[in-house]
Image (cartoon, grey):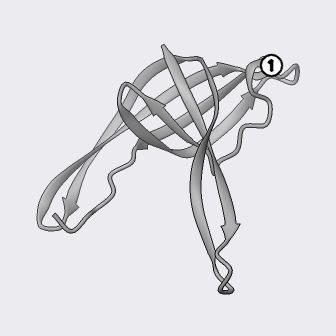
Amino acid sequence: NQIQIYNLTVTPDGAGGSTSTYTLAQTLWAKIVAKNGNRGFEDSRIALDQTYEMTIRYDDYPEFSQLDKIMFNGGLYVVQSFSTIEERKKTIIIYCTLDRQVNGN
């Protein structure tokens, strides 16, 4: 599957604060497997969280960070954790969940 990785960019706002935005860093291929799911409550509604395991080649994106977000199939995914497999650094396994931002609607 093709995914897009977005990096966090923090820029000063000129008033002593900062603004955080995500910018597209790279589009690459990944193997995606749905893992365990959890059910809970959020805002008096049942919320389902599905964890996904995304495997990418280390050489395709060696500077991967836990602050990155991933766009796949129209959804934005938050990185929960990741690890580099083997000492030879051939692959990066990323565990993430769909970003469910609560808005005022």
Q: Is residue 104 left or right of residue 13?
A: left
Quadrant occupied by the C terminus: bottom left
From what the image shows, is residue 22 above or below residue 103?
A: above
Residue at 31 percent of width and 38 percent of height = 37
Quadrant housing residue 92: top right
User: Residue 47 or 72: which is nearer the viewer?
Assistant: 72
Residue 3 position within the rendered picture, expressed as x and y whole percent measured from the top left: 52, 23
Residue at 65 percent of width and 48 percent of height = 66
Picture mark count: 1
User: For the view shown, which residue lies furthest in the front direction?
Assistant: 14
Residue 93 position within the rendered picture, expressed as x and y whole percent measured from the top left: 63, 28
Q: Is residue 5 left or right of residue 61?
A: left
From what the image shows, is residue 78 above or below residue 62?
A: below
User: For the view shown, which residue lies furthest in the right direction?
Assistant: 88
Quadrant housing residue 21: bottom right
| Disc 1 target residue | 59
User: Residue 80 or 25: which is nearer the viewer?
Assistant: 25
User: Residue 75 or 30: which is nearer the viewer?
Assistant: 75
User: Residue 73 or 65: which is nearer the viewer?
Assistant: 73
Label 1 amino acid? Asp
Residue 25 position within the rendered picture, expressed as x and y whole percent measured from the top left: 66, 35
Q: Is residue 43 left or right of residue 60?
A: left
From what the image shows, is residue 47 above or below residue 70?
A: below
Residue at 80 percent of width and 19 percent of height = 59
Mark 1 lies on a secondary structure that is helix
Residue 50 position within the rendered picture, expressed as x and y whole percent measured from the top left: 33, 38
Q: Residues within 10 Å of mark 1 (few under 14, many from 20)?
A: few
